[in-house]
Image (spheres, rainbow, N blue to C red):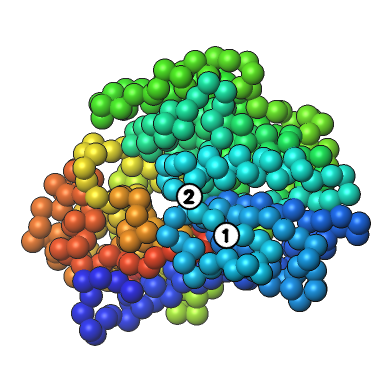
Amino acid sequence: MTSGTSEGQTAVRGTLLSLYEAAVAVAHPDVCLPTHLPPPPPEGRLYVVGAGKAAAAMAVAAQTHYRTLDALDRIGGFVTAPHGSTATFASSPQSAIEIGSARHPTPDAASQQAAERALALVARATERDRVLVLLSGGASALWAAPAAGLTLGDKTELSRALLKCGADIHEMNTVRRHVSRIKGGRLARAARAPLLTLAISDVPGDDPATIGSGPTVPDATTLADARAILERRRASMQALGLTVPRGIEMALTDPANETPKPGDPAFASSEYRIIATPAAALAAAGDVAKQEGYAVVNLGDALTGEAREVARVHARLAREAKAAARRVAIISGGELSVTVRNRYGRGGRNQEYALALALALDGLPGVSALAADTDGIDGGTGQLTDPAGAIIDAGTLAGARRLDAQKFLDENDTTSYFEAAGGLIVRGPTQTNVNDFRVILVDA
């Protein structure tokens, strides 16, 4: 539902929301997981570990599948999802796969306990067994095993600094892989048993090394790459009064923290499958748009860059379509970034994009848009009650003239703006994550 809408919600808002829900639905574990689940090994056990925003739903879907095979007595393990997102998936004493929780987007003590437990469980499996890893976006924070000499506080401070300074997901995970004992292929290195990873992708380009910081795949990046990222982002961090812990800087100079590379024997019996992608989510939404009579312009699932800058580019595309009297749906995915100028503002990258788009359209009639995270949480405070994103339409654009919208944007306080102008999407956890979803509807 959207906050700030009237009882007579416009048809176009309903269309926007139906596109968003179609993108989410195709990536839900109930839909994408069961056909990929392996049988238990003939003479051993299936050990299950997992982490991410979809982990709880993946565990439930897997348990349902193995119950139909009458094989629950041969599987066991646990998964970790964000705090507060697992209420409807509470484990019972009869559960073969336990569901736990930890903090996201920055790790906590539960994140460290989950990572240590996953490493130990995987190491316990023998060559007769099989390890099944259920992975989705968010796993980087939910599994935190600091490299030797580092504390959980060091990693939390690092994550917070990277998030606030506008680092994109590839940059963040390159650094995090090199200060961890589970990321960057190290979970696979701990395993003796054959290992299968089933992953729901939340990253542009579906790079396995970036999904959850790649705990079961080789890493082509280096310690030098990680150091270069911190140096490139240092000025932005300093402007916000943020610093990288000294221990992190030292860890990134220690050769012992280099990640296992392609060709490492640790991956000889490891298989990796991506079972849901941002591209498939965009395609599902595009099908709904076509049914509604729109020509679809798909900009792809790998968009990156500053949210407000990308919004200005997309506004030009909408203006061109309007000038040509074209009825189009401009769809895009990927993960944009926000360089925070006001650390006390409320809002996420999708709300930032939506407000910047509203300003760039400057009241152009017949244009509406939605920008939301497919996990149901756009960030800001990091709480599960955060909006998923926002809708803009003629009413929102009129609100931009009543309020000082540019001031809200400059102060990264977009949630406050949309609370006043209307258009927030309050969804709650969707139990999946295929990154951001954006659509602009241009009516001729």
Residue farthest to the right, as pictured: 43
Q: Residue at x 17, y 49 (%)?
A: 408
Is 432 or 360 nearer to us in this picture? Answer: 432
Q: Residue at x 44, y 48 (%)?
A: 103
Query: Eyeballing the image, is 125 above or below 419?
Result: above
Q: List x then y, in percent, for residue 115.
A: 59, 41
Asked if residue 27 lies left or right of residue 438, the reply is right
Q: List x then y, in percent, for residue 5.
A: 23, 75
Asked if residue 264 lies left or right of residue 241, the reply is right
Q: Which picture quadrant has residue 113?
A: top right
Q: Is residue 350 visible?
A: no
Query: Eyeballing the image, is 334 above or below 213?
Result: below
Q: Residue at x 61, y 31 (%)?
A: 181
Asked if residue 352 lies left or right of residue 299, the reply is left
Q: Secondary structure at mark 1?
A: strand
Q: Which mark is residue 167?
A: none
Q: Secondary structure at mark 2?
A: strand
Please state, as top left, top right, bottom left or bottom right, where the C terminus lies in the image: bottom left
Asked if residue 20 lies left or right of residue 41, the reply is left
Residue farthest to the front, as pictured: 93
Please state, as top left, top right, bottom left or bottom right, where the N terminus lies in the image: bottom left
Is 64 or 243 nearer to us in this picture? Answer: 64
* Mark 2 to mark 1 CA distance (whole Å): 11 Å
In the rendered picture of this protein, how many numbered marks are placed on residues?
Answer: 2
Residue wearing tag 1 = 99
Q: Residue at x 47, y 41 (%)?
A: 109
Q: List x then y, in percent, for residue 422.
A: 21, 67
Is 405 or 165 nearer to us in this picture? Answer: 165
Q: Amino acid at mark 1?
A: Ile
Q: Which picture quadrant has residue 122?
A: top right
- Could you classify mark 1 by the number of other residues whose Cα lies within 10 Å: few (under 14), some (14-19), or many (20 or more)? many
Q: Which mark is residue 102?
A: 2
